[in-house]
Image (spheres, rainbow, N blue to C red):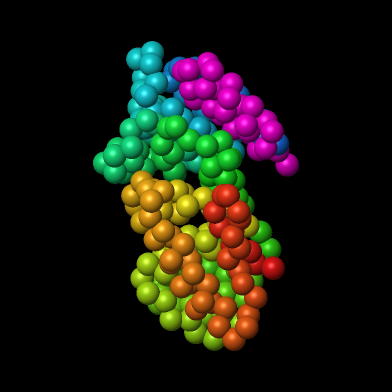
């Protein structure tokens, strides 16, 4: 089923480019050029996700739109787009009710991947609960902070645990290095670092002990994908 996405963007060219990328991805899009229009559309129509430009013109900026929607009980996942890249800016956006934050300029492949992650529904073999995550033969206890694969305990360091948790919450999604770094490490990705590749290699080694099939696939030119089968 095609996703319905609301694009809130005051720059007509950028809005058209985002819409074209989402159309190619199989989604249906609507557009709001102002904050007032965005609030009206989001409150009266169903959308699977909202892409919200933070620095809107016309009197109501993006975070004000977000606050109005959350205050009205609209729980639609929101991806904030902004040229503001400081950690404090991203934190402010997320605390205002945003579900994700993407810094401009961005790659449209990453944009569609983030929308996929925001809108993914629970599927067979995956339990989205507060206490446990299950993907394939990997079981994660979020309370005890333990991991078992094929019945065998896997000892992970805190960062490895956080990385695996992020993968297990987004099974099948192509996660770019920038997405992983921002959501697991909490900082903007620096292409000069290989910290993600190092941690993924260590995590693979621990998960695949005993000749088990590798669950973390490398997607050339994009990032990584966590597969249940």
Total numbered circles: 0
Residue 126 lies left or right of residue 88; in this view the side is right
Q: Is residue 173 visible?
A: no
Picture coordinates of residue 33 (x, y %)?
Answer: 49, 17
- The quadrant of the image that shows the N terminus is top right
- The quadrant of the image that shows the C terminus is bottom right
Say which residue appears at 46% left-offset and 73% top-offset.
Answer: 202
Quarter of image, res 20:
top right
Q: In this view, does 180 lie above or below 154?
A: above
Quarter of image, res 72:
top left
Quarter of image, res 13:
top right
Residue 174 lies left or right of residue 28; in this view the side is left
Asked whether residue 3 is drawn in magenta, I would say yes
Residue 149 lies left or right of residue 202; in this view the side is right
Q: What stretch is highlighted in magenta?
A: 1-25
Picture coordinates of residue 139 (x, y %)?
Answer: 54, 75
Q: Is residue 150 above or below residue 73?
A: below
Say which residue appears at 41% left-offset and 48% top-offset.
Answer: 191
Q: Is residue 90 visible?
A: yes
Asked whether residue 187 is drawn in magenta, I would say no
Give the farthest residue toward the top.
Answer: 58
Query: Considering depth in this image, is 140 or 20 the residue closer to the camera?
Result: 20
Residue 179 lies left or right of residue 134; in this view the side is left
Picture coordinates of residue 74 (x, y %)?
Answer: 48, 36
Say which residue appears at 59% left-offset and 21% top-offset.
Answer: 16
Query: Considering depth in this image, is 198 or 63 the residue closer to the camera?
Result: 198
């Amino acid at each position: 089923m095609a996703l319905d996405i609301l694009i809130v963007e005051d720059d007509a060219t950028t809005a058209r480019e985002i819409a074209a990328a989402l159309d190619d991805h199989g989604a249906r899009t609507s557009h709001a050029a102002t904050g007032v229009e965005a609030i009206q559309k989001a409150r009266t129509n169903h959308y699977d996700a909202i892409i919200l430009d933070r620095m809107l013109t016309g009197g109501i900026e993006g975070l004000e739109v977000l606050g109005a929607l959350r205050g009205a009980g609209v729980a639609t996942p929101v991806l904030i787009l902004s040229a503001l890249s400081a950690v404090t800016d991203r934190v402010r956006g997320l605390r205002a009710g945003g579900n994700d934050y993407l810094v401009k300029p961005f790659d449209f492949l990453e944009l569609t991947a983030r929308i996929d992650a925001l809108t993914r529904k629970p599927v067979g073999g995956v339990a989205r609960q507060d206490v446990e995550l299950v993907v394939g033969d990997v079981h994660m206890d979020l309370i005890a902070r333990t991991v078992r694969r094929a019945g065998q305990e896997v000892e992970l360091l805190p960062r490895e645990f956080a990385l695996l948790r992020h993968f297990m919450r987004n099974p099948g999604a192509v996660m770019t290095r920038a997405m992983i770094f921002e959501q697991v490490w909490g900082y903007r990705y620096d292409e000069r670092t290989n910290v993600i590749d190092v941690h993924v290699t260590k995590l693979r080694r621990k998960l695949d002990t005993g000749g088990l099939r590798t669950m973390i696939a490398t997607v050339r030119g994009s990032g990584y994908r966590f597969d249940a089968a």
